[in-house]
Amino acid sequence: MTTDSNSPAHRRLRARFVAISWRDLAVSFGPVVLLSMAAIWLAVWLVQPAPPRTVTISAGPEGSSFWNAAQRYKTILARDGITLNVLASEGSRQNVERLADASQNVDLGLVQGGVSQGLDVDGLVSLGSMFYAPISVFYRGARVTKLSDLTGKRIAIGREGSGARALSLTLLKANGIEPGGVTRLTAYDGQEAAQALIDGRVDAVMLTGDSATGPTMRKLLRTPGVRLMDFAQADAYTRRFTYLNQLTLPRGVFDLGRNLPPQPVHVISPTVELVARDSLHPALSDLLIEAAREVHGKANLLQRAGEFPSAQVHEFPISDDAARYYTSGKGFLYRHLPFWVASLADRIVVLLVPILVVLIPAFRLVPSLYSWRVKSRLYRWYGALIALEREALADDAHTEYRNLRHRLDAVEAAVNRLKIPLAYADQFYVLREHIGFVRHRLDAMNAAPGTAGSDAARHTDGAPPAAREDGVRGA
C-alpha cells in the first residue's frame, strides 16, 4: 500500500522533547553503580575492624620484673579505654607456649631471648625489645669467672617453664654441664633460690628477669660470702649466642657507700621482647609501643635514656606495624586525635579512598555514556538513509520507487516518534532535514528514470553542503 504524499501520516510530528532521559541516565549509571558496589565490598573486606577493648598478656611470676612491667602497661592502656588482662606465668618459656597455642586466649607475652628453641613460633611477631634481663650468677666460695668452674656443684637454675631455666640450661650445656651429670641442677627459683644459697643448700643460683626481683637481688648483694659472678668470657658468649649482649656494671653501682660491687662486673644479658600474634590490631601495636616507651624509656643502671623500646630483635621477626612505628612514629590521625576517634577515622579513610578512586573516574564517564546513548538513537537511522540513497542511484531505481519511498516513509515515521532530550533537539532536526534531502533525491530519480547518474550529480551539487556532509558522516 502506497502512502499519500500530500497528506502523509508519516509526517505527523509525534516526537517528545524532555528535559532529561531518565532511562538513558539509569543505563549510563549502571556500570558506575556496579563498580561502586565492587569497590565498597572490597574496601569492607580489606578494612580492619575496630580494635578490641580487651587484650591479654602472659607476663611472669607475680612480683617479677615482667609482672611489674605488665601492670604498668595495664595502667597506661586504661587511659585509652583498653583493658589489659595480666596472666601470671612460670616465665618466658610458658609465655611463648601460650602464644603458640591457638586455643589459649593470649594476645601478648614478655619473652626473653634464648627460650623458644623447639617451639613452633610461626605466626608470632615482635613489637621490639623492651629491656635487658641480665643473667645473674650468685655463688659462694672461691672466686668464679667461668660457668665451667661450677662443675660438680649444686646450682639452682629456676623452675620449669621459666626463662631463667631455659637460658641456664643452654649456657651450662655449652660449658659441658647437663642434667643427670655430676653437677646437681635444682628447680629453686627467685626468692626461694636466694634463700637456698644463703642457707647453704646450693652453691650457686642463676637468676634472670622473670625470676629475680629487686628485693631478691639486693638481699644477695648484701649477704656476706655471696658474690656476683664476673663473666670473663662475656665476649665469647655474645659471639656464640647472638641474642646475648655484654653489659658492664661499674664498681659501686649498687651501693656507693659499701662499694658494691667492689670491682667492675661483666654480665651477659638477653633482651626481653614484647611478642604478639600476627593478628594483633595495628592500632593496638602503636598503643603498646607507646606504653612500653613510657615504662622502659628512662635511664637506669643497665641502659641509657631512650635506648628502649627498640627495633632490635633476635628470635622473632619484627611486625610490619612495629617497623613502621620505629621508622616514622604514630600515624597522623593518632598523633592529633583521641585513640578511639583516630581509630574510627582511620577505618573510614581506608573505606573511602578505594571507593573515591573508582567513583571519580567513573562519574566522569557518565556524561559521555549518556550522550552516546541519546545520539545513537539518532545515528542509527543514518545507516538506513545512506542505503536508500545508494539504491536511488542505481539505473533501475525508478522501478523500485514505490518500495524505496515506502521504506523512507517508515524511517521518517519512526524518527518522528522518538523521545529526545531538549539538549539534542538540534541534531533531531538535522536528521529530519537529511530525511527530506533523501526524499528529494528519490523523487528526482523517479521523475527522470533514464538519467539517474546525471540527476544524482545535479541534485548533489544543489544540496546544502552541510546537510550532505552531515548525512554521510552520521551514516
Image (cartoon, rainbow, N blue to C red):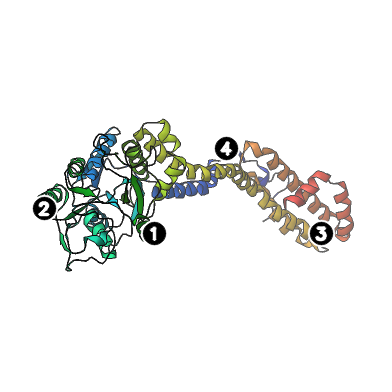
Q: CA distance from mark 3 to mark 1?
A: 99 Å
Mark pair 3, 2: CA separation: 125 Å
Looking at the image, which is closer to me, 54 or 188? 188
Residue at 71% of width from left, 59% of height from top? 403
Left or right: where 212 falls relative to 295: left
Q: Nearer the viewer, mark 4 or mark 2?
A: 2
Of labels 3 and 2, the one closer to you:
2
Tell me which amino acid carries mark 1: Arg
Q: Amino acid at mark 3?
A: Leu
Residue 81 seen by the camera? no
Q: Gap in Å between the C-alphas at discs 1 and 4?
A: 80 Å
Q: Which residue carries the number 4 mark?
A: 20
Q: How far from the left and from the top, in percent, is residue 284? A: 34, 42
Q: Which residue is mark 2?
A: 200
- Of labels 4 and 3, earlier in sequence is 4
Residue 10 in view in this figure? yes
